């Protein structure tokens, strides 16, 4: 098909861009319904023994490994059957989750529901991100990912607060059941009616590059990869053969330690300190709102100043914010430390994905994003496992907080040492020495 048939840019594809933003909002709300209420009430509602940190973290471990794997699968699958079909399948997988929570007789039911959630999140969130990158200009990638992650994590924070109040009014199980079913059904209907497949845009961009009709600076694409690489070739490139992709992938993995901590340990820690469910929802929500809202600025900022320094400063700021949580007490202090951590996440999170998008060729961009997200979300599982083991061994939750704080500081140092700037305007291929 003529490459001119597809126009790129947010303005040129505004209607479809907004539909995709709605989808990722609903994706975030689906994730958010599993946070705040379930960890805080794990002992009372679902029979988790007091002090059993490993058992408490089991559902996040399951989520991380499943979601990471499905990110990988989603990227490859979307290059064969299209983005919309993968998105729709992800929503259908989520239908049993609310009834499983409603009728759960043990914590094993929650772990099983979280496995389905991991499949849902791996398929749906990957597709909303990839689809937006398909239809926007390369110079808008920071803004695009920023808006995507703002919408998703605004949904996470919003759902955490809404479900906290619904649980107080209706009971935890009924509140989560009604909220979850409403969200998933709306998502299925809107996907089927209004979402378009964006794979043709990616094919059009690839043809333009091949024909020499691409405009603007040429990105520093990796040279040691085939034009149409297989799964293993892309995986090895992302995981160790390209030092830039390796640095970005490890940073993505480690930053998920923060989210695993805030998902489970924050609600438990704050509940032990005597905060009500509603106040816990607001503290955890502060992290999500600042993370989401700030990405309006941080994503677009990286389109102007580059990806590298926002990523590094965000990693370090997150490490500081997590450590500060333990330095004092009170609702306002915990809200401040959560907000600081959220700001760090806003600096690093969209720009890691944008950096991968910068130097991943359109022929294999879906796979590259899927593999980056595989390593990133594997961080949920690895981080939750490390948090559970460390806190179980010490007998206190604070060990997990210090572990995450140190990991973030060291990971940011790795990016500083090993990763160059990826923005094609600031570091274009034509200034690169041959490798």
Image (tube, grey):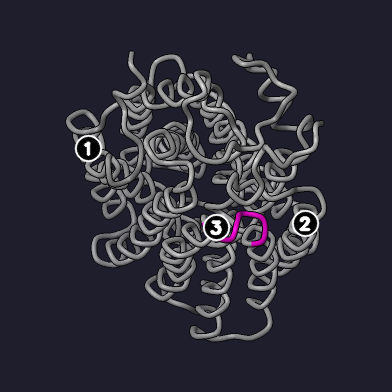
Looking at this view, is 367 or 377 the one in front? 367
Residue that label 2 marks: 416
User: Do tag 1 and tag 3 residues touch (Cβ < 8 Å)?
Assistant: no
Looking at this view, is 348 or 166 the one in front? 348
Q: Considering the whole magenta stretch, tell me its main secondary structure.
A: helix
Q: Secondary structure at mark 2?
A: helix
Residue that label 1 marks: 185
Direction from residue 352 to residue 409 in the image, left or right: right
Residue drawn 33% across the image and 16% down it: 2
Mark 3 or 2, nearer chain start: 3
Direction from residue 405 to residue 188 in the image, left or right: left
Q: Secondary structure at mark 1?
A: helix
Q: Is residue 186 above or below residue 35?
A: above
**Marks 2 and 1, Cα distance to the nearest angstrom?**
44 Å
Local packing at callout 1 (Cα closer than 10 Å; few below 14, some 14-19, many 20+) is: some
Residue that label 3 marks: 302
Is residue 305 magenta-colored?
yes
Write down the region rendered in magenta.
304-309
Quarter of the rendering containing residue 10: top left
* Percent coordinates x, y for residue 192 in the rendering: 21, 28
User: Do tag 2 and tag 1 residues touch (Cβ < 8 Å)?
Assistant: no
Quarter of the rendering containing residue 217: top right
């Amino acid at each position: 098909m003529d490459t001119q048939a597809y126009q790129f840019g947010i303005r040129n594809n505004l209607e479809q861009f907004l539909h995709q933003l709605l989808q990722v909002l609903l994706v975030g709300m689906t994730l958010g319904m599993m946070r705040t209420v379930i960890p805080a009430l794990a002992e009372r509602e679902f029979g988790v023994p007091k002090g059993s940190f490993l058992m408490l973290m089991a559902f996040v471990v399951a989520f991380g490994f499943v979601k990471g794997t499905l990110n990988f699968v989603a990227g490859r699958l979307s290059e064969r059957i299209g983005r919309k079909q993968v998105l729709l399948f992800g929503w259908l997988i989520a239908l049993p989750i609310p009834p499983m929570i409603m009728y759960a007789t043990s914590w094993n039911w929650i772990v099983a529901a979280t496995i389905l959630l991991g499949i849902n999140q791996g398929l749906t969130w990957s597709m909303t991100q990839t689809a937006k990158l398909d239809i926007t200009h390369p110079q808008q990638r920071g803004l695009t990912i920023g808006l995507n992650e703002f919408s998703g994590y605004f949904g996470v924070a919003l759902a955490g607060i809404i479900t906290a109040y619904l649980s107080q009014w209706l009971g935890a199980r009924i509140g989560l059941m009604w909220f979850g079913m409403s969200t998933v059904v709306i998502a299925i209907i809107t996907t089927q009616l209004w979402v378009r497949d964006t794979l043709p845009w990616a094919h059009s961009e690839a043809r333009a590059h091949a024909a020499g009709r691409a405009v603007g600076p040429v990105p520093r694409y990796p040279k040691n990869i085939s034009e149409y690489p297989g799964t293993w070739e892309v995986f090895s490139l992302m995981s160790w053969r390209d030092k830039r992709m390796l640095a970005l992938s490890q940073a993505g993995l480690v930053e998920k330690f923060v989210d695993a901590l805030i998902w489970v340990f924050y609600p438990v820690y704050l509940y032990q300190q005597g905060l009500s469910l509603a106040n816990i929802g607001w503290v955890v929500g502060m992290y999500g709102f600042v993370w989401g809202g700030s990405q309006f600025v941080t994503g677009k900022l990286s389109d102007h100043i580059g990806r590298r320094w926002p990523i590094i400063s965000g990693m370090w700021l997150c490490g500081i914010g997590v450590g500060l949580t333990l330095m004092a007490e009170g609702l306002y202090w915990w809200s401040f430390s959560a907000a600081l951590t959220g700001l760090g996440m806003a600096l690093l999170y969209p720009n890691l994905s944008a950096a991968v998008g910068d130097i991943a060729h359109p022929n294999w961009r879906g796979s590259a994003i899927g593999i980056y997200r595989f390593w990133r979300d594997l961080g949920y599982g690895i981080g939750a496992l490390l948090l559970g083991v460390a806190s179980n061994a010490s007998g206190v939750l604070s060990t997990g907080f210090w572990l995450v704080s140190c990991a973030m500081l060291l990971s940011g140092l790795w990016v500083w040492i090993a990763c160059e700037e990826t923005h094609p305007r600031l570091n274009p291929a034509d200034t690169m020495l041959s490798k």
